[in-house]
Amino acid sequence: MASRREFLAASAVLGAASIGLLSTARVLASSKEDRDRLSPVDVINMMKDGNERFRRGLRVNRDFLREQRERAAGQFPAAVILSCIDSRAPAELIMDLGIGDVFNARVAGNVANPDILGSLEFACHVAGAKVVLVLGHSSCGAIAGAIDGVELGQLTGLLSRIRPAVAETSYEGARRSSDAVFVERVARTNVERTIGVIRKESLILRELERKEAIAIAGAMYDLKTATVSFLPPYER
């Protein structure tokens, strides 16, 4: 059995490691100058680091009220995240972000329509965000609804934007919403399709990406493991 001295020594090492991780955390949008110095890849890497802290239970101890007060006069978000409305996948929390760090556009199934595209254009062209991140997730109800052919009021039109991803997803198992693997495969295809829609229908964002002023990236969030996995070419 370990002695009390050994236990305290081990605790000190773990504590130092945790402090080291926390000390590397940065507020993405502390100032316009700081944000503008970041490259798109810098921003993506900082989101990855934030998710790692979240996944390991080492989130930064933030003073959200102070952050709110500091940013009341202006905002300089480093990214805009197009994510699903699912209550289990709040983008700022799962990537350990603070108030003012990112814009967050949320719509069921993280699809892109004209209003969403206009919001993304504002975020990048007007406000200076460096990354457009399309974030899908496992066990997505909107994806399941598209697979099942659900029709319900205005939801029918929204799901019609997802259904092409169902048809385009190769899968040899049961192509049903009861198959969690199929649902996740379709969700990933839907992220890829949404990125394609953004590039096709927004000349502004396409040109910013061509000039390497922004990155348009995709990622999937696993509800069980709390891991955000970026899609190629940003997976590493």
Image (spheres, rainbow, N blue to C red):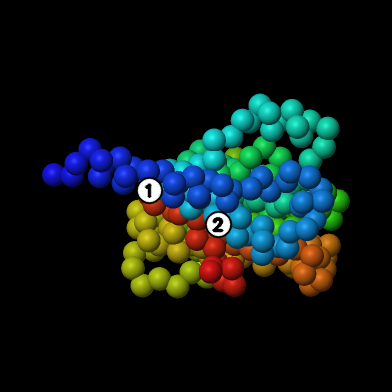
From the viewer's side, name the closer residue of 25 and 215.
25
Residue 198 at least partly seen:
no
Residue at left offset 44%, top offset 59%: 184
Specify the quadrant of the image occupied by residue 176: bottom left
Q: Nearer the viewer, mark 2 or mark 1?
A: 1
Examine the rendered structure and indicate whether residue 211 appears above or below residue 35: below
From the viewer's side, name the closer residue of 157 and 143.
143
> Which residue is farthest left?
1
Query: As drawn, is 208 to the left or to the right of 22?
Result: right
- Say if mark 2 contacts mark 1, CB within 8 Å: no
User: Where in the figure is residue 202, as x and y percent of width and height?
Assistant: 79, 62
- Other-residue count near label 2 (Cα within 10 Å), few / some / many at <14 / 14–19 / ≥20: many
Specify the quadrant of the image occupied by residue 63: top right
Instruction: Look at mark 2 in the image and give the residue it sits on.
Output: 48
User: Where in the figure is residue 166, as x and y percent of width and height?
Assistant: 50, 63
Mark 2 is on which residue type? Lys
Residue 218 at least partly seen:
yes
Residue at left offset 30%, top offset 40%: 8
Mark 1 is on which residue type? Val
Residue at left offset 61%, top offset 65%: 193
Instruction: Look at mark 1 in the image and give the residue it sits on.
Output: 13
Gap between marks 2 and 1, in whole Å? Answer: 24 Å
Examine the rendered structure and indicate whether residue 67 appears above or below residue 186: above
User: Where in the figure is residue 67, as x and y percent of width and height?
Assistant: 69, 33
